[in-house]
Amino acid sequence: MPELSLYETPGAEDYRRYDRIWKRVSPGLDPYPDVRAAQPDATMEPRLPTAPGANGESCCMGSAARDELEVIRAFIRGELADAQTYRYLSALAPAPEGKRLVRRLAADETAHARTLQSVHFLITGETYPVTVVTPPQPRLRWRDVLRGRYHEEACGGSNYAAAAERTQDVCLKRILEKLSADEYRHAELLRALLERAL
């Protein structure tokens, strides 16, 4: 049977409590010399495990999130490009309902980029300067535009979900899962708009 430390033995809590009382009553007295002699390095104070963040490492958005920086930067560029695309498409929408939806999607994608920019700053302490220029958009029928955007949003949801699964950073994982849900929600809104346009 392996040898037990002082704090794994039955009644160890009693020793700690009594030791604190004796220190107040008579600080120079050693009331349990035989216990201390059996374990010379043992103290009566419990050894607490190192708490998260105690070593100067951040509990969230620290070294585990650093591994995802390139992915985060790619997501920022993608969100900004999607926002530009939606702003362009809002002028092409044949009905007010479509115009409103794509303007709302442009605002959502811009908000996603800001969220990811804040994540980047939390990890690195630096902003990520990025300028995105989208190539000219081909003139397509409205339903073909909706079809293409549906697939883009669904793939975005899938990519965020995969990144969330991969990361070891709990806070980053939660943000990526939320962004994944938003992208899937966008895909569903576009699918519903396409359904009405057919």
Image (cartoon, rainbow, N blue to C red):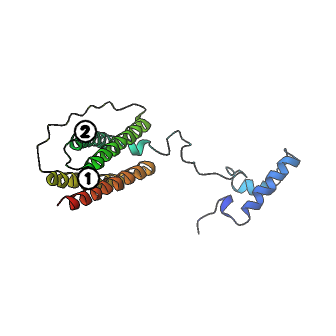
As helix, strand or loop, the secondary structure at mark 1 comes to helix
Going by the numbered disc 2, the residue's amino acid type is Gln
Q: In this view, does 172 lie to the left or right of 140?
A: right
Closer to us: mark 1 or mark 2?
2
Going by the numbered disc 1, the residue's amino acid type is Glu
Residue for point 63% across, 51% down: 48
Residues 30 and 87: in front is 87
Residue for point 22% across, 55% down: 150
Q: Name the residue under label 2.
A: 84
Q: Is residue 29 left or right of residue 111?
A: right
Residue for point 71% across, 50% down: 43
Residues 53 and 17: in front is 53
Quadrant housing residue 82: top left
Q: Earlier in the sequence, mark 1 or mark 2?
A: 2
Label 2 Cα crowd, 10 Å radius (few <14 / some 14-19 / many 20+): some
Q: In this view, does 175 lie to the left or right of 159?
A: right
Q: In which quarter of the image is the C terminus?
A: bottom left
Residue 185, position as x, y percentages in the image: 33, 56
Residue for point 84% across, 52% down: 21
Residue 93, position as x, y percentages in the image: 21, 47
Q: Mark 1 points at which residue?
A: 153
As helix, strand or loop, the secondary structure at mark 2 comes to helix
